Image (spheres, rainbow, N blue to C red):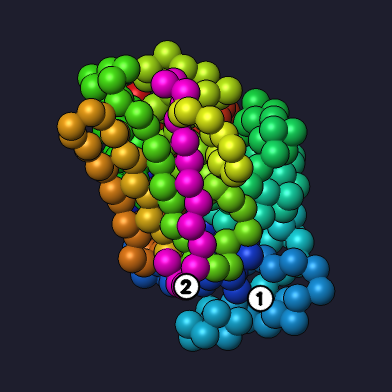
């Protein structure tokens, strides 16, 4: 069951001075169904110890930024943590949340197989929503893309093109990988059919290949296009993010949904009822 609607969900946000951290602080502040009870930054950050509102330029919260998630959880009697930091930090945050029985929403990307497995291990103790993209719209696009691939069949080559701002550290994006994986599953292909780069004399395109192309530049929040390229026709499915607010809205929706769930690994398809 989900959290009761008559009591605000007690929420801790990690990495509060990052782009997504500031967005989440503002959105939780403005959501009557949630209350911010803790905020963290990395050890050594100049923002540690000052008011989260001053750190994020959002006014006064009377809530200090901590460099210890454990301390923030204990002080705030938190029900859920929303984490958009980094894969490495998220693994440690998952361990701390599991020790204290606090639900977790993870929007970080760039996980290695080992790091992802560690987060999955912690989901045996607590409910964790983990998704490379919290946007409601993009998760619907992923579902539609998989269905399109299934219906169109083998006569179409499939390519995913993703574009992000110049500051993004991982490539291809976690969303593009998720799209390719869901498409592959829908048409009976495997991860080995997904190709993330091409260079040199590569030869003819294999029929079962699913390509992912990466573009970086400017301040693009996020754009993903799936191309189904057939003989004599082409189908394109695109999602464009113009604001980080849409990631924040999905994350808040996930946070409200996950509180009170049984331990396990969930994603936005579960939150949105798309299974």
**Residue annotated with mark 1:** 64
Q: Which mark is residue 94?
A: none
Asked if labels 2 and 1 touch by Cβ distance under 8 angstroms, the answer is: no
- Residue drawn at (48%, 46%), measured in percent from left and top? 213
Task: Judge by depth and name the residue closer to the eye, 165 or 271.
Answer: 165
Kind of element beneath mark 2: loop
The C terminus lies in which quarter of the figure?
top left
> Is 124 placed left or right of 218 in the picture?
right
Residue 270's image quarter? top left
Would residue 114 be found to the left or right of residue 59 on screen?
right
Position in image of residue 139 (x %, y %):
35, 41
In percent of width and height, residue 247 lies at 41, 56
Please state which of residues 250 and 256 is positioned toward the viewer in this rendering.
250
Position in image of residue 101 (x %, y %)? 65, 39
133 is within the stretch colored magenta: no
Magenta residue span: 206-220
Residue farthest to the right? Answer: 44
State whether residue 1 appears in this view: no
Residue 242 position by quadrant: bottom left
Look at discs 1 and 2 and give the one toward the viewer. 2
From the image, which quarter does the N terminus lie in? top left
* Residue occupying the point 67% across, 73% down: 65
User: Where in the figure is residue 126, as x and y percent of width and height?
Assistant: 61, 34
Disc 1 to disc 2, C-alpha distance: 33 Å
What is the number of callouts on the image? 2
Instruction: Please tell me whether residue 270 is drawn above or below residue 95 in the rendered image.
Output: above
Does 223 sit above or below residue 100? below
In the displayed structure, 187 sits above or below 181; it is: above
Q: Which residue is outermost to the left? A: 232
**Residue on which disc 2 sits:** 218
The front one of 228 and 42 is 228
């Amino acid at each position: 069951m989900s959290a009761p609607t008559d009591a605000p969900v007690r929420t801790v946000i990690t990495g509060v001075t990052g782009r997504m951290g500031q967005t989440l602080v503002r959105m939780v502040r403005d959501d009557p169904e949630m209350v911010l009870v803790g905020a963290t930054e990395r050890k050594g950050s100049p923002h540690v110890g000052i008011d989260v509102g001053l750190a994020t330029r959002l006014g006064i919260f009377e809530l200090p930024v901590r460099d210890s998630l454990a301390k923030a959880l204990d002080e705030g009697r938190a029900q859920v943590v929303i984490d958009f930091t980094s894969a490495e930090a998220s693994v440690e945050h998952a361990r701390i949340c599991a020790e204290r029985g606090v639900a977790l929403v993870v929007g970080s990307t760039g996980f290695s197989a080992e790091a992802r497995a560690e987060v999955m291990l912690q989901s045996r103790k607590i409910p964790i929503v983990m998704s490379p993209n919290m946007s409601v719209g993009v998760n619907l696009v992923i579902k539609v893309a998989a269905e399109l691939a299934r219906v169109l069949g083998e006569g179409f080559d499939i390519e995913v093109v993703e574009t992000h701002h110049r500051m993004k550290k991982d490539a291809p994006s976690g969303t593009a990988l998720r799209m390719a994986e869901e498409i592959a599953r829908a048409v009976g292909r495997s991860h080995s059919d997904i190709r993330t780069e091409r260079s040199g004399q590569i030869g003819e395109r294999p029929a079962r290949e699913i390509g992912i192309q990466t573009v970086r530049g400017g301040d693009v929040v996020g754009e993903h296009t799936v191309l189904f390229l057939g003989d004599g026709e082409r189908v394109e499915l695109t999602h464009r993010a113009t604001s980080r607010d849409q990631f924040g809205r999905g994350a808040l929706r996930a946070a409200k949904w996950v509180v009170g769930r049984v331990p396990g690994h969930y994603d936005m398809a579960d939150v949105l009822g798309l299974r």
